[in-house]
Structures are given as C-alpha cells and as structure tokens.
Amino acid sequence: MPPMQLHWDIFCHVVDNHGDIGVCWRLARQLAAEHGKQVRLWLDDVDSLRPLCPAVDVAKDRQLCQGVEIHRWAGNVAVDRVGEVIIEGFGCKLPEGYLRAMAQAATGPCWINLEYLSAESWIEGCHGMASPHPTLPLTKYFYFPGFSAATGGLLRENDLLARRDAAAKCRPPREGIDISLFCYDNAPVGELLEVMTGSPSPVRVHVASGKPLTAVQAHCGGNGPWQFGELRVIPFDPLPLDEYDKLLWRCDINFVRGEDSFIRAQWAGKAFVWQPYVQEAGAHLVKLDAFLGRYTAGMNHLAATAAVNLFKAWNSADNLRRAWADFLAARMEITAHTRRWSQGLAERPDLCTDLVKFCATKV
C-alpha cells in the first residue's frame, strides 16, 4: 500500500497572469476534490488568481477556497510544517527556509519540479529523472506533462468530457460561427480581423481582455463591441476557469496561447489555433512543429495542411489570408479530428492522477 501523502504544497511564481497560475490552480483544486489531498497553494501574486477564481479575497494572506488553502508567498515563508509532496511549479525557486525544513523532515518529502508542456520527444527521456540536491539530503524529480504514455499526461478533471458533451446537447443552433480569441501581443490580430471582415456570413469574435483586447482596440479604435459587415467583435471580461471552458465549448474555432488554454482547447474538441510563448532562438517554433506533428497525424492531407499553415501563419504573420481561407474550408474535418484527438488523449490517465501515483513510489 503506497503512503497516503496527504499534505501537498504547491509553489507558484506567477509570470504571465494566466498560464502558470491556471495550471497550478487547476492541479491544486483537482488534488483536493478528486484525491482528497490537503493542498496549500503558495502564490507570490494572489491578485492574479482573482479573475480565475472570483471567490478569492486578495486582501487575505491565507484563506480556504474550493478545498485549497491559498497562502500569499512573500519572501522566505514561515514554515509550520512541510508537505509530504512539494510541487515546484515550472522551476520556481523554493524559499530557502522551506528548503532547509524539507531537509530536516523526519520522512523525506517527494519534491517535484512540474515542467512546461511540450510535444517534443526528448521530454520522454527526462520525465521522472532524479536530480539530487548538491548539498542537502534531498532529491528533486522532473515531471513533464505530455501527449505520450512516456510522459506525465495532461490535466483533466474526471467529468470534464461528460460536462462538455452535456453542454453541447443544450446548445441552440446559430447562424454563422463563433470564435474565441486569446493571444499574446505579438499575434497578427489586426490582419486576422481584416481577413474576417470580408466574410459573407456572420462571424462573432469573442476577445479576451488584456493583451488580445488591447490589440483589437489598437486596430479598431474605441472600446467595442465593433461591427464590420458580417463581423462582430465582442470583448469579454476575465472568466473563471470553468466559465472559460464553456466558452471554448460554445465556439467553433478557438485561438489560444501558452499552456493552460492550449490544453483546454484540445479538451473542447473544436478546431483551434495555438500561439506558444515566444522563446529565444525560436525554441517556441520547435515546440509548435513537435505538436503539429503529433496532432495532425491521422488527419486527412488537406485538413492537416490547412491546420499546419494557419498555426504557422498565426505565429509568423505570413500568408494569413490564404491560410485562414483554407482552414475555414477544412474546419469541419479539423473539428472532427480534434474531437477524436481529445478522445484518444482521454484514454490515458490525467496528469493529476498520474502525479499522485508517481509520488507514491518516491517516498
């Protein structure tokens, strides 16, 4: 019988307001809700969680929300106890005092570096790799989310696809298409809207606040909503995570970025376009190619070409008009393939369940 490992500490350094905190928050609440763990989520920027979870009180340094203890992480946190499992979100550096307390714990804790998601094959050889601390009696394990059985899987609540499918049955028919837009500030938003303006049928673009909306405002002027022929552009305020999932389910095409919304777009089972976070030396384009190689395998040639071309055009601002037209023409096949893709991914254990099992073997 593996140890219970009841107490988990997750440390999250917020970098871009949505991706890191989105992943850590989903993991924390799933550990509590589905695995009965007592989870403390240490955040250096509690304010950033508020849009994703409106119940959070940003004035409090410590609070309980959706079964998770949320702690403000300010400097070298006072340690009253060390978790049996410690998650270092995306390589954030643990407080020195906490690290020393880990080393002094009667039972050595399981220390995990939760890495960024990638479809690159090299992560399969690094998933689960041990890294002994140079001076303390501690070992850190690298845990890589991923798309193959040799990786740590993807975050997915156990009822997610059932809720998605139930929502689809209640959706009334609509004329035209709905598109969600969530992107970084270097995406060719203005060019995309120009292309859509010529649509012969209704197109509704739902634009996330922040960088996407700023880009739209810079192109269109004013604060919206905007109407250009059959194109309507509609801003939306930050949504709690579950409400954002529902938006992805309602839309016909989802433009997503980073990691959290990227994963959720795949679970939505709709056509989508991904913008990875820009990295030095074009490393993000390597990630993009690696994902496209896995995702389009089994897709018919025309649809695969259309998907690849639009993903690349969205990330390079090159040939976007032609790529958009081809993507729209292949949308139904791409949507059907994405649904099959999500069903295939769901046949593997989700990241949270896999992580619980992984940690049980390390103590």
Image: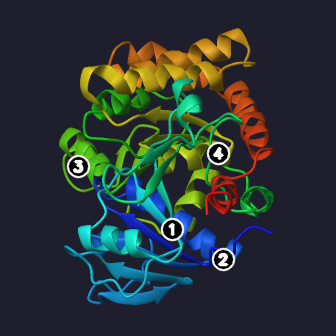
* Residue beneath disc 1: 108
User: Which-is-in-front pick, marks 2 and 1?
Assistant: 1
Mark found first going from the N terminus, 1 or 3: 1
Q: Quadrant of residue 247?
A: bottom right
- Whole-Å distance between the Cαs marked 4 and 1? 26 Å
Q: Is residue 238 above or below residue 267?
A: below
Q: Is residue 290 above or below residue 149?
A: above
Considering the image in quadrants, where does the N terminus appear?
bottom right
Circle 2 packing at 10 Å, graded few (<14), some (14-19), many (20+), is some
* Residue beneath disc 2: 33
User: Which-is-in-front pick, marks 4 and 1?
Assistant: 1
Mark found first going from the N terminus, 4 or 1: 1
Residue 162 locus on image (x, y percent)? 79, 60
Q: Amino acid at mark 1?
A: Gly
- Whole-Å distance between the Cαs marked 2 and 3? 36 Å
Asked if labels 4 and 3 touch by Cβ distance under 8 angstroms, the answer is no
Considering the image in quadrants, where does the C terminus appear?
bottom right
Q: Amino acid at mark 3?
A: Thr
* Residue beneath disc 3: 214
**Is residue 94 visible in the rendered structure shown here?**
yes
Mark found first going from the N terminus, 3 or 4: 4
* Residue beneath disc 4: 153
